[in-house]
Amino acid sequence: MKRGIWSAVGAYALWGLLPLYWHALDTVPALQVVSHRIVWSCVLLAAVVIVTRRGKGFLTACATPRTFAIYAVAAVLIGANWFTYIWAVNAGFVVETSLGYFINPLFSVLLGVVFLKERLRPVQWLAVAIAAAGLLYLTASYGAVPWIALVLAVTFSVYGLVKKLAPLGSVQGLTLETGILFLPALAILAYAASTSAEAFPQTSPMTSLLLVGTGVVTSIPLLLFAVASQRIPLLWIGVLQYIQPTLQFLLGVLVFHEAMSLSRLAGFGAVWLALAIFAVEGWIEHRASLVPVTTE
């Protein structure tokens, strides 16, 4: 249990600190950074699958048309999510990316209601309503729809919904997803190298090392999360996941000095209140379910 908690904390902390890594690559176009992330992640994850002797079962599953189709959809969604995230970080929208990951759990809940026929309790509906009010207020204060946050939340929540249908584990699944995107990503990198003298591998040694390292910074949190998901209850996962957007928010405000007016802070406050209500209600409900029912 203790190892699982620390693994989850490590995974979410690393994900939360990723803007620092992407910002170090702000001279490289976002599409190329994402392509490197796909290529090097695929190589590293494939090595993990082989070393752990899961290759045979992995190839058998990949050959199933339904499995391949599910992961093809997931690959498109995670690719769009990664591109939007990296572009937004290097365009100076780290705070808005944090908003996307704050509201993502609530989007996932709504998808569960619509597609999986799950039911929300009254207090959960209240949390969703408060979050929606916060988003509307942020839209008014921005003067525009916070589309980056919405794209990140929608793509990742739909990605999670698709993965509920997927038969492979998290490591094998991402290996297949990056494998599906591998050739298009490689083609993008090859085209960039042939048309620009500043593209990889002609980049500076430090930039080249960081680009290759995108596979490592993608895979390590995933492996930590895989350990955590096997060792601790989903309730803990649900609570600890807010480490990621909290760190992103703090980086955006304190490190990258993005503007945070009182009106924007009020909108974020509504979202945070909704999440607090949702988390506390879930914890109370979970505790109540552990109380044994006695009959007289």
Image: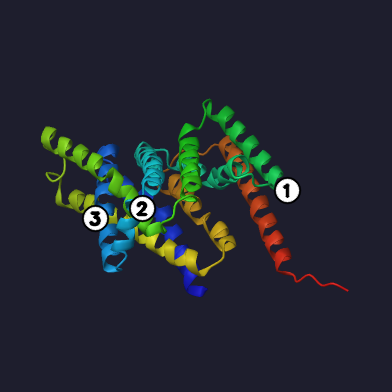
The percent position of residue 256, horizontal first and vertical second, equals: 40, 44
Considering every residue shown, the one lying at the far top of the view is 143
Residue 43 numbered mark, or none: 3
Q: Residue at x 38, y 54 (%)?
A: 173
Instruction: Write down the residue under mark 2.
Output: 174
Q: CA gap, disc 1 to disc 2?
A: 35 Å
The percent position of residue 63, horizontal first and vertical second, equals: 32, 51
113 horizontally vs 170: left or right: right
| Quarter of the rendering containing residue 236 | bottom right
The answer to the question of whether label 3 and label 1 lie on touching residues, with beta carbons closer than 8 A, is no
The percent position of residue 78, horizontal first and vertical second, equals: 39, 44
60 horizontally vs 239: left or right: left
Mark 1 Cα shell of 10 Å, populated few (<14), some (14-19), many (≥20): some
Identified by mark 3, the residue type is: Val
Identified by mark 2, the residue type is: Leu
Q: Earlier in the sequence, mark 3 or mark 1?
A: 3
Quick check: can you spot residue 98? no
Mark 2 Cα shell of 10 Å, populated few (<14), some (14-19), many (≥20): many
Count of marks, rendered view = 3
Q: Tell me the element at label 1.
A: helix
Quadrant of the image containing the C terminus: bottom right
Identified by mark 1, the residue type is: Val
The percent position of residue 49, horizontal first and vertical second, equals: 30, 62
| Quarter of the rendering containing residue 216 | bottom left
Instruction: Write down the residue under mark 1.
Output: 123
Taking 224 as reference, is 263 above or below it? above
Quick check: can you spot residue 113? yes
